[in-house]
Image: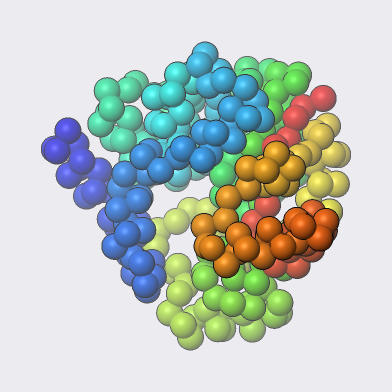
């Protein structure tokens, strides 16, 4: 295990150097190295939306460094990892080996999945759709490989995000893209020195308004649920800060919690976390 962990650190570290500006870089790096240990919330999301993990045929599309794929496999799912970046495929393999797992890993794009139709119960695509060439082609492929009644859990970036999820700069999504990219460059937060194959410049990425993204999903035969809104309805939405918990309690007492959530989703949050069910 120590030798495998050292190998994993060696292959991961070059892919983190463009983020050394983060004030929490050491903690963020540790979470990348041990990513599979931090997946409890997303595993709960899967179970809540799509049912028990045990025996589930699950595709991790855009598996990244493999943390979720490995955690889901350890939880009993029959996981296939699909990743566009070949170097990340190697990282997924090393992470799986650290736990004695033989995880199928495919190097492919989300717009052309190398799997038969209706071959998965669930697809996850965390932090993926903003980087593909064609979001609509990716959604069409997800719909194809899902069985009827299957679920896709994914994230999509809010075009109005106040703090950009990739560059962590306030307000840049409210500016013209050329101006925003000049600010990113001046702050030294560009990713030009990293060897990514996918789309990483702000002007290249696909961000969405909430209603716009729902309409896109529905065109591909999905019904859509906001996972955070579902947690809110069940009284399970967690706020890490005491001040936010107090504000939410006050809004709830006034009957305004749902309205405030929808306003925040429209005008502020960084990303939407959604469950898509194939009709």
On the image, the x and y values in percent for residue 191 come to: 45, 67
Identify the residue at horizontal 49%, vertical 20% (top origin): 77
| Residue furthest to the left | 3
Q: How has the structure been colored for display?
A: rainbow
From the viewer's perspective, is 37 left or right of 80? left
Image location (x, y in percent) of residue 227: 68, 42
Q: Is residue 64 visible?
A: yes
Q: Quadrant of residue 261?
A: bottom right
Determine whether 161 is above or below 80 in the image. below
- Name the residue located 75 percent from the left edge and 67 percent from the top edge: 267
The extreme front residue here reads: 253
Image location of residue 92, percent across then percent down: 37, 36
Q: Nearer the viewer, residue 25 or 251?
A: 251
Q: Find the residue positioned furthest to the top.
A: 55
Q: Where in the figure is residue 56, as x and y percent of width and height?
A: 55, 18
Q: Height in image: 191 above or below 134?
A: below
Left or right, residue 157 beside residue 192: right
Res 266 → quadrant: bottom right
Q: Is residue 5 left or right of residue 146?
A: left
Q: Is residue 106 visible?
A: no
Residue drawn at x 53%, y 21% is 53
- In the image shown, does 143 or 260 lie closer to the viewer? 260
């Amino acid at each position: 295990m120590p030798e495998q962990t050292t190998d994993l650190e060696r292959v991961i570290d070059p892919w983190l150097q463009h983020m050394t500006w983060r004030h929490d870089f050491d903690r963020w790096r540790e979470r990348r190295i041990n990513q599979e240990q931090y997946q409890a919330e997303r595993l709960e999301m899967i179970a809540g939306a799509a049912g028990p993990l045990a025996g589930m045929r699950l595709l991790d599309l855009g598996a990244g460094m493999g943390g979720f794929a490995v955690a889901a496999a350890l939880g009993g799912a029959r996981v296939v990892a699909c990743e566009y970046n070949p170097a990340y495929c190697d990282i997924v393999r090393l992470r799986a080996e650290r736990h004695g797992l033989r995880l199928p890993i495919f190097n492919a794009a989300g717009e052309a999945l190398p799997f038969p139709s209706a071959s998965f119960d669930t697809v996850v695509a965390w932090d993926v759709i903003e980087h593909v060439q064609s979001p609509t082609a990716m959604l069409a492929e997800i719909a194809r490989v899902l069985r009827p009644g299957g679920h896709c859990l994914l994230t999509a970036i809010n075009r109005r995000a106040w703090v950009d999820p990739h560059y962590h700069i306030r307000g840049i999504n409210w500016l013209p893209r050329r101006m925003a990219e000049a600010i990113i460059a001046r702050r030294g937060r560009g990713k030009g020195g990293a060897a990514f194959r996918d789309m990483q410049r702000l002007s290249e990425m696909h961000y969405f308004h909430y209603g716009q993204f729902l309409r896109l999903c529905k065109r591909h035969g999905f019904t859509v649920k906001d996972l955070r809104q579902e947690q809110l309805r069940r009284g399970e939405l967690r706020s890490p800060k005491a001040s936010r918990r107090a504000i939410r309690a006050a809004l709830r007492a006034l009957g305004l919690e749902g309205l405030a959530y929808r306003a925040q989703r429209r005008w502020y949050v960084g990303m939407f976390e959604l469950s898509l069910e194939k009709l």
